[in-house]
Amino acid sequence: MSDQVISLRERQWVSNWRDQKDLVMKEIFTAYYQPLWLTSYRMLSDRSLAEDMVQEVMARVWQMDSLDHIQSNFGGYLHRAVLNTTLNKIRERKRWATEPEDQLELTIRDVKRQAPEELKQAIELAIAALPDRCRLVFVFSRYEGMSNQQIADLMEISVKTVENQMTKAFRLLRSALGHLNAE
């Protein structure tokens, strides 16, 4: 419960926002940029676009007259804002573009060529190769620690669909990374 209580530093940010906005914004950016970017990147598998998502959230914070409405963990507030912004971008991209069907196969072949000592990179690449919905469900579950019900509510899908997408993710990841176990 203590992680949901606003910290002393965050209280100072809220109280100093009007008088020292530049300094407060710099501290917020320094404290939260990297983990927020990583969250967005895991969802999008696009470094530049993930950076845009975090900057968009930071720009919205900058435009606020006050931070008084943030009653809980500031990091959690920003994290949720980045999740929502990234989800909106994914929905927007899905409406306007379709990805080549063979993209997954090409990426998996690239993973199979990597040396076993690059396991972490291979895993990240394999996750990035998952289909959009499948990757989102996997990231929410394994990286964000969300329950199937929370994921279903957030993505507006059924719990059964979440379970199916997790099964699919594990099957695709096992297939993509199976060679690392044999070496």
Image (tube, rainbow, N blue to C red):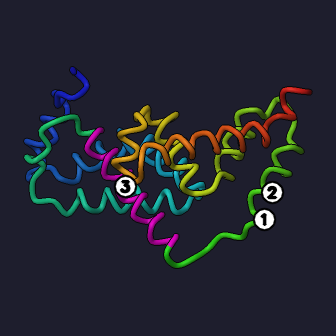
Kind of residue at disc 3 = Glu
Assess whether mark 3 and mark 2 are in contact (beta carbons under 8 angstroms): no
Cα separation between marks 2 and 3: 28 Å
The stretch drawn in magenta includes residue 81: yes
Question: SS class of the residue under badge 3?
Answer: loop
Question: Can you say which quadrant of the picture contains the N terminus?
Answer: top left
Residue at image mark 2: 105
Assess whether mark 2 and mark 1 are in contact (beta carbons under 8 angstroms): yes
Q: Please give the range of residues in magenta.
A: 76-94
At x 48% / y 36%, what residue is drawn? Answer: 141
Label disc, if present, on residue 156 of the rendered structure? 3
Cα separation between marks 1 and 2: 5 Å
Q: Quadrant of residue 71?
A: top left
Residue at image mark 1: 102
Question: SS class of the residue under badge 2?
Answer: helix
Q: Residue 83 at x, y = what percent?
A: 38, 51
At x 34% / y 48%, what residue is drawn? Answer: 153
Q: How many marks?
A: 3
Residue 151 to residue 45: above or below: above
Q: Residue 44 at x, y = what percent?
A: 54, 56
Q: Quadrant of residue 133?
A: bottom right
Question: SS class of the residue under badge 1?
Answer: loop
- Nearest the viewer among 45 and 136 is 136
At x 52% / y 62%, what residue is drawn? Answer: 49
The stretch drawn in magenta includes residue 164: no
Kind of residue at disc 1 = Asp
- Nearest the viewer among 167 and 1 is 167
Cα separation between marks 3 and 1: 27 Å
Q: Is residue 53 left or right of residue 112?
A: left
Q: Earlier in the sequence, mark 2 or mark 3?
A: 2
